[in-house]
Image: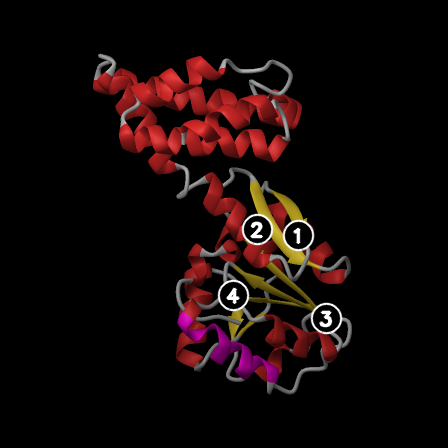
């Protein structure tokens, strides 16, 4: 079941399982034909009722039309008992998903999220999750499960690791340039620093924090904060304080830095 650029969703990334695709439904037969032709798999049907014979239904639609497509699917003459509904790279509210669950379906949201070779699977354990794992293997990916009510928490983590941190990377590069490092080299050096920090964390978790066991020198930190300039210095102080408070380490240094705030 689809709308929009279905071929650019996870459905379009299927390899060997394309031959398993059956009826393709949409808001009209013309759109269903276009989707099937673009996928080079499945066959168009005139009504969502004809999806009843499928054990798993894959759905993709752009955000502005996903709820209307789901409503069309919900009102179709489909016995949902034991079926899996997989929302591929699209969104549906918890209330909408709950209605399909009450009809007997297993529901999963599967989407890529910026980490290579991974696809997130928002689902309870069950048939829908098993379908996502099979689809992921076909695409050479690994499915990582999160609980169905954790969309916003997961998205917050992705934002922290991507868009929210980019200005910090840029500010660190600016400090390197201000110290005399050439533009290109500054970008490479700061990228290497952040990458190494991430690798260390993957290996040792919070114990990879530079000051987890070794107390930082408060005077040296104050000198760095001063040398960074007013704006970058404020950010640096806040981040250092955040680390000390988060890990509850070296509280005497925390007190000194707070006095200097």
Which of the two discs, 4 and 2, labels the residue nearer the N terminus? 4
What is the C-alpha distance between the residues marked 3 and 1? 20 Å
Residue range (magenta)? 64-74
Q: Are marks 2 and 1 in contact (CB under 8 Å)?
A: yes
Q: Looking at the rendered structure, which numbered label has been put on residue 91?
A: 4
* Label 2 Cα crowd, 10 Å radius (few <14 / some 14-19 / many 20+): some
State the separation of the CA atoms marked 2 and 1: 8 Å
Residue at label 1? 146
Secondary structure category for the residue under label 4: loop
Q: CA distance from mark 4 to mark 1?
A: 15 Å
Relative height, residue 15 to residue 200 (above, below): below
Q: How many numbered marks appear? A: 4
Q: Earlier along the polypeptide chain: callout 2 or callout 1?
A: 1
Relative image position of residue 134 (x, y in whole percent): 68, 51
Q: Earlier in the sequence, mark 3 or mark 2?
A: 3
Instruction: Where is residue 214? Give x, y as percent.
Output: 60, 13
The nearer-to-camera label among 4 and 2 is 2
Of 6 and 89, nearer the camera is: 89
Question: SS at mark 3?
Answer: loop
Looking at the image, residue 205 sits to the left or right of residue 6; the answer is right
- Residue underneath mark 2: 154
Q: Which residue is mark 3?
A: 83
Residue 58: in magenta span? no
- Where's residue 36, x and y in %? 47, 67
Magenta region includes residue 71: yes
Say if mark 3 contacts mark 2, CB within 8 Å: no
The disc, 3 or 4, on the residue closer to the chain's N-terminal end is 3
Mark 2: secondary structure: helix
In what quadrant of the picture does the C terminus appear? top left
Separation of disc 3 and disc 2 at Cα? 26 Å
The residue drawn where x is 54% and y is 82% is: 71
């Amino acid at each position: 079941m689809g709308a929009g650029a279905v071929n650019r969703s996870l459905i379009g990334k299927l390899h060997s399982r394309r031959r398993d695709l059956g009826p393709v439904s949409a808001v009209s037969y013309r759109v269903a034909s276009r989707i099937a032709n673009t996928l080079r798999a499945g066959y168009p049907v005139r009504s969502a009722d004809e999806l009843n014979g499928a054990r798993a239904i894959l759905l993709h639609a752009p955000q502005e039309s996903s709820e209307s497509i789901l409503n069309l699917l919900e009102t179709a003459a489909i016995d949902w008992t034991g079926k899996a509904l997989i929302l591929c790279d699209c969104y549906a509210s918890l209330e909408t998903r709950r209605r399909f669950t009450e009809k007997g379906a297993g529901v999963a949201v599967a989407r890529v999220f910026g980490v290579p070779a991974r696809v997130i699977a928002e689902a309870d354990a069950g048939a829908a999750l098993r379908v996502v794992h099979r689809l992921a293997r076909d695409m050479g990916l690994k499915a990582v499960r999160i609980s169905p009510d954790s969309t916003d928490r997961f998205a917050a983590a992705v934002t922290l690791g991507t868009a929210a941190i980019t200005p910090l990377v840029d500010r660190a590069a600016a400090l390197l340039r201000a110290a005399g490092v050439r533009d290109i080299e500054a970008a490479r050096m700061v990228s290497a620093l952040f990458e190494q920090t991430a690798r260390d964390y993957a290996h040792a978790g919070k114990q990879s924090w530079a000051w987890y066991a070794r107390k930082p020198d408060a005077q040296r930190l104050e000198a760095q904060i001063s040398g960074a300039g007013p704006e970058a210095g404020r950010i640096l102080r806040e981040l250092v304080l955040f680390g000390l408070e988060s890990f509850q380490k070296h509280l005497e240094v925390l007190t000194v830095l707070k006095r200097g705030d």
